[in-house]
Amino acid sequence: MSIALLQLTWLLAKGSVRRVWRMCRTPAGLISMVLVLGCFVAGVAPSLAVYFLKPPEPDAVPGFAKHVGPLLPLLLFVTTAVLIVCEGGKSMLELRPAELQFVLAGPFTSAQILTYRLLTVAISLLPLCVLLTFFMRVYFVSWLGGVIGITFAVGFIIMLGFQYTLLQPRLSPRQISLIRLGLLAALLSVVVEASYRLANVFSAATSLSELGAESIVACITKSNTAIIVGFPFVPFAKTISAPADVSLATNAALSLAILGLITACCYRTSAGFAELAVEGVARRIKKLERLRDGNTYQSQRGRSGSVRYGIPTFPFLSGIGPIVWLEITIALRRNGRFLIPCLLLGAIAALVGGITVRSRPDWMNSTVQYYAPSIAFAIASYVGGLIAIASALGLAKPPRTLDWYRTLPVGPTAIAIGAMSGTAAAVSCLFVAIQLPAIAISTQPLSDSLSTLVLGVAFAILLGTMINFVTAVSGLRATPTGTPDILQGARSLFYMLLFAISLIPPILFALASAAFAGVLFEIRPMSFALGGSIGLLVGLPAIWWYTGQRFRDRESIGTE
């Protein structure tokens, strides 16, 4: 690696530390830093206290390694497939315009530029991997194995994303489509085969006590497709779960060899890395120009320069229509490759489950079958929260892309409502995809099952609202842009903490509202679900108003 690029990396690191120091010298920055350190200590202290005060027996295997360990290869494959299908490697390979100007002006080869980018990513990810192992110290057989395994596994997944991005210019559109379809087909095969095995286990079980975690994990890991797709990730999973003995050294060496092989492949195909970086900056600049011109995602220009079709301006709520249309369009473009297959899988699973329930009523445990909508709601709520944070929609988008909102003759409350619509639409689609199969197999009345879906849509609206609220109040974002630094992980964790705290009052009020509705009308799922939905939505207008006011008054939001 060139000495100039090493100096650039050192200067960027010093600049990050200097910015943190300046921030800590202000009262607000000092309070934020104390909260971040408090969250870190609160997360690490219980894990370390349990480990040192009650050390595990020498031959004991933690439940995490026993139950989740066999699933690690499949989970790593799923993470890689999502990264490749969503083209996450492009964003990780992008450089900021100032960095790109420095890099292109110097006599640097593509391999040196790639080394610089990998170094900046490693500086950001290595501390996060170490901190994650501190949080999960109790669940590892060996802390050293957890550090090495997680670091190598994350590095391997990122390098696979880099390799796919570097190969894209050499592949035809048909070949790229075949790669994505192959990954989606592999995931679908795993789901179908595991579902078939789980259905056999459920039909043979006579009580919930027989449905242990080991039997469910065995159904998933013993499927032939899961074994095939998870094979390249087995050494990394074994390193994470290995004790501190010869097996750790053997699996770590094999993992390092695989990581070195994919890294060498990236360097062999790094000839067009500079062009890819230029394309990334060009995409960002073009997007900003479209936003400044008012020509958003759905507008295209012909040869004459005239707009072929524009965004409908629905005249309600002070011109909220363009913002709603823009946010929903962005949400579908960003998450369409994930949501559309989920909706198709949900519809197919609902059809198969409904036919199976009517042909074989005793194929599943009656208790699980009755509470299937509630179980699906809990799963969709967790996954929907992750998607809402990771999507970075609404006011959580990069600050410079929000300048378009300021040019519209729209009130601040309307901006807050419209900015929430994209996240709400994406999470609502996820709720529909996950809850459709549960509704099809449930023995509850149809009105009770559908009311749970209504509760899911209300919760999606709450997630979109609170994402914008936390962003407007704190100025933080869950997915910072630009060159990674060692503090991005801490800012993301602090943002997630604020987001979780902001959800507590609406959820508590929704629980109280659900209990009141159940007592007032009838104790049944529909009363609880509709009462909880009203409780989630009743306080949102005030939050929309305050979010809009904060967004309007934050003068620095366009220049952060």
Image: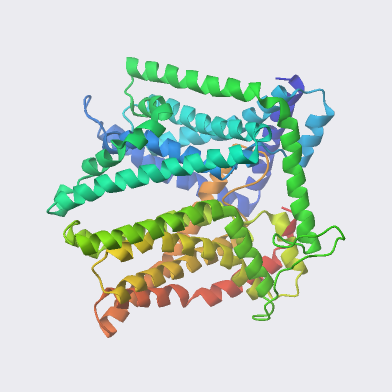
**Which residue corresponds to the image point at 74% horizontal and 40% vertical from the top-left?**
279
Q: Nearer the viewer, residue 299 or 259?
A: 299
Where, by quadrant of the figure, is residue 525 drawn? bottom left
- For the view shown, which residue lies furthest in the left direction? 206
**Which residue corresponds to the image point at 59% horizontal and 59% vertical from the top-left?**
331
Residue 54 in sight in this render: yes
Q: Position of residue 356 (x, y in %)?
A: 25, 59
Q: Position of residue 172 (x, y in %)?
A: 65, 37
Q: Position of residue 371 (x, y in %)?
A: 25, 63
**Which residue corresponds to the image point at 80% horizontal and 65% vertical from the top-left?**
307
Is 471 positioned to the left or the right of 502 in the image?
Answer: right
Q: Nearer the viewer, residue 204 or 479?
A: 204
If the image is split into quadrants, where does the N terminus sit?
top right
Q: Nearer the viewer, residue 210 or 485?
A: 210
- For the view shown, which residue lies furthest in the bottom direction? 520
Is 170 positioned to the left or the right of 179 in the image?
Answer: right
Q: Position of residue 141 (x, y in %)?
A: 31, 28
Where, by quadrant of the figure, is residue 490 drawn? top right
Quick check: 512 above or below 249?
Answer: below
Q: Nearer the viewer, residue 282 or 125?
A: 282
Is 385 positioned to the left or the right of 237 in the image?
Answer: right
State how many labels appear. Answer: 0
Quick check: 95 above or below 272?
Answer: below
